[in-house]
Each structure stands twice: as C-alpha cells, then as structure tokens.
Image (cartoon, helix red, strand yellow):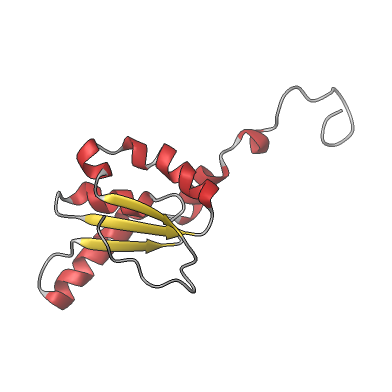
Amino acid sequence: MNVSGKGKARRGPTMAERADRHDLYEQAVLDSKAEVDFMRATYRSIRGRAASFFREDFAGSASTACEWVRRSANCHAIGVALDPAVLEWGRKHRVARLTKSQRSRVRLVEGNVLNAAPVFSRR
C-alpha cells in the first residue's frame, strides 16, 4: 500500500529513500566556494599574504577541503571527521573528482576534533 494507506501499492523506493543524504546536506548547508572565498580574503586582509593550508573540522564530505586545493597548486588541506563511513563517502564522491595533483594535497583523517590534538602535517 502507499504511504497514506489508500490506493495503489507503492512501486519501488520513495524519492526520500533514493536520495543521498550527504549530497542533500551539502545542498542545504554548504557553500564551499563562498566559504573558501571568504577564508582566503580574510586571511589575506589580516596576514597580508595568501593562505596555503586549511584544516576542515567536521569534514566528512570533504567538499570545502577539495575546493581549497582546487584554488592553487600551493594549497593543502586536511579534513578531520569522526565517522569513517562519511569520510569514505567524501573520498568516493568529492576527492575522487580532483586531479591527481589535487588529490595528493588533501588528507582525510578519522578523529574527534573536540578532543584530538590539531593535525598540521601536510602528509
């Protein structure tokens, strides 16, 4: 039966069941391009030079880290997140879209950003 209990039986999964929750989250919450624009401009205005390193906390999808390394061959990013399944999604759906050079400058780390020491290594 359908969701309301009336009419024809439902065929196949619903739109909600077919949706990718990580993709929907990004569409609803993230604007990685604007975020990177803001960070780069703010850093330059404060420090007088371009930023080259970025640590993305709660970075499961790695979208902002990926956008960061797309901007310049001098940019490196580390993404830290607690959930290994979400990190794997980010590797498959975001990092995999980068060029080989860009992929070499992104590192995703499983860890709790609330109680872990900062990760600053580029490798």
Q: Give the position of the N terminus as an image quadrant.
A: top right
Above or below, comparing residue 102 to residue 41 in the picture:
above
Above or below, comparing residue 17 to residue 90 in the picture:
above
Which image quarter: residue 102? Answer: top left
Q: How many marks?
A: 0
Residue 19 or residue 58, whichever sits in front: 58
Q: Is residue 44 rendered to the left or right of residue 89?
A: left
Residue 115 screen position, x and y as percent: 49, 74
Q: Is residue 81 rendered to the left or right of residue 64?
A: right
Residue 55 or residue 37, whichever sits in front: 55
Residue located farthest toward the right when viewing the structure as drawn: 6
Residue at 52 percent across and 50 percent down: it is 84
Residue 22 screen position, x and y as percent: 52, 46
Which image quarter: residue 40? Answer: bottom left
Residue at 72 percent across and 24 percent down: it is 12
Q: Is residue 56 rendered to the left or right of residue 101?
A: right
Q: Give the position of the C terminus as an image quadrant.
A: bottom left
Residue at 47 percent across and 62 percent down: it is 111
Residue 93 screen position, x and y as percent: 42, 38
Q: Is residue 3 rendered to the left or right of residue 105?
A: right
Residue 29 screen position, x and y as percent: 48, 56
Residue located farthest toward the left when viewing the structure as drawn: 48
